[in-house]
Image (tube, rainbow, N blue to C red):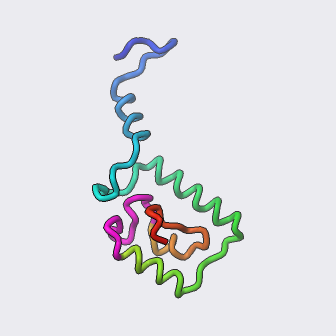
Amino acid sequence: MKEPDGNRLVPEEFDNMTAKMFTARPDPKEVGEPPPIPDLIRNFYHGMKDWAQDGFKTEDEAETNRRLGICQGCENFKEGRCMLCGCFMKLKAKLSTGSCPAGKW
């Protein structure tokens, strides 16, 4: 245990977990798995909020396919998912407010 912080003790394990949750994402070339759960939840929440504020608009089939084609050629795309944001790109590419976290579309 660490020294008391106010009236509580903070175990080292909690400090390690917290540090992992709030550290910057690694270089995209090194990403091999989706972001941690707290990041996934935050990304989903903001994505759905933006989409709702835009009136739940969707892209046409041509634009959706163009976006997915870019995703499929990306080094961060794995098993239908973006390893940078953790989103399932078949859905995200369809949303009018969807965007690529690497800025490719």
| Residue at horizontal 47 percent and vertical 15 percent from the top | 5
On the rendered image, what quadrant is the N terminus found in? top left
Is residue 103 or residue 56 the one in the foreground? 103
Q: Is residue 101 left or right of residue 28?
A: right
Magenta stretch: residue 65 in it? no
Which region of the structure is painted magenta?
Answer: 73-87
Q: Determine whether 54 is above or below 3 in the image.
A: below
Q: Residue at x 51, y 52 (%)?
A: 41
- Percent from the top left, x then y, of residue 28? 34, 57
In reply to whether residue 85 is colored magenta, the answer given is yes
Q: Residue 55: image x %, image y %?
A: 71, 70
Q: Position of residue 57 (x, y in %)?
A: 66, 75
State the residue in front, 97 or 17. Answer: 97
Magenta: main secondary structure equals loop
Tell me which corner region of the image, top left, top right, bottom left or bottom right, holds residue 79. Answer: bottom left
Q: Is residue 56 above or below residue 86?
A: below
